[in-house]
Amino acid sequence: MMSIMQGDKLPFNQESYTFTIAGVVERMGFSGPIPIRSDVYIPPGPAEGMKKISLTSIRDFFKPAEKLKGYTAVTIKVASIKDVDSVKEQMKAKGLRTFAPVDQLDDIKTAFIFLDMFLLAVAMIGITVASLGIINTMVMSILERYREIGIMKAIGASDRDIKKIFFFESGMIGFLGGIFGLALGWLVSMVINQIANYFIAKEGAPHVQLFSFPWWLCLGVIAFSILISLAAGLYPALRAARIDPVVALRHD
């Protein structure tokens, strides 16, 4: 392979060009269909006389030197996203292939749908595990307070009163868990946001806020956590209400 690459007919040449710097443009982020920054802009006139290789396949390395003129790609910047379709049609009419980042939006949306489904499945597993943990905690609380429940029922507490006590305790577990989970999620998102913006700033792009915590979402998270906890505390509350006070007072 090295002997072939060193042949005399390969389109490799070494030439020097001198240009006058006319100005410095504002630093840009990623541009074009591939994430490579444009470092130097050369006017069309001088650029037309420069020898270039249009790299579309491995065969381009073996083109004769007289066929080197031309451009590999041209980047067109439109004033508005609404102009993308009309510009693409004009380029296609000239027999050129086109690519625009908006072409990938449908694929990106589909990928996010699958990602959302995956995250939803993970969240459901987490909710199920958390519910089982709450049920286990409340059942253990019943066993530890067996005599206490029997005493409360012996001095006049009704089954409804016992249910209220355990519902309140399970609701408090959900409330505190929702507050803690929300705070932990906010902290982790802030760390990820800072790390992401560190790399984004290196590409010259402006600072972006990747995560949002609106007040209605925060309240919804806490309310949902309380509802899940109350649902998980239903069985322990019913079990505690059915305790026979005579049996409970004899319990060691």
Image (cartoon, rainbow, N blue to C red):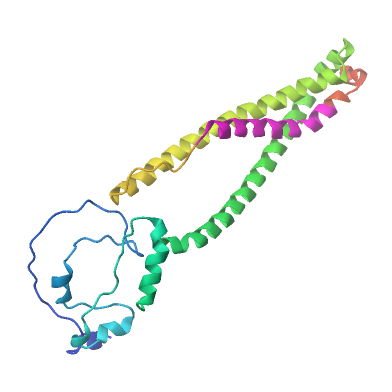
Please, is residue 62 above or below residue 51 in the view?
Answer: below
Looking at the picture, tell me which residue is in the foreground, 240 or 71.
71
Q: Nearer the viewer, residue 95 or 97?
A: 95
* Residue 247 image point, x, y percent: 91, 21
Residue 158 x %, y %: 87, 16
Above or below, 54 against 158 in this view is below
Position in image of residue 15 (x %, y %): 10, 76
Q: From the viewer's perspective, tell me whether residue 193 is left or right of residue 112.
A: left
Residue 117 visible here? yes
In the rendered view, would you say 8 is above or below 152? below
Residue 86 magenta: no
- In the image, the segment drawn in magenta is 213-239
Residue 189 picture location, percent across and down: 46, 39
Numbered label tally: 0
Instruction: For the C terminus, give its image quadrant.
Output: top right
Foreground: 30 or 165? Answer: 30
> Is 235 one of the magenta-colored residues?
yes
Q: Residue at x 43, y 37 (%)?
A: 190
Q: Is residue 145 visible?
A: no
Q: Main secondary structure of the magenta part?
A: helix
Q: Please give left or right for residue 131 compared with residue 246 in the image.
A: left
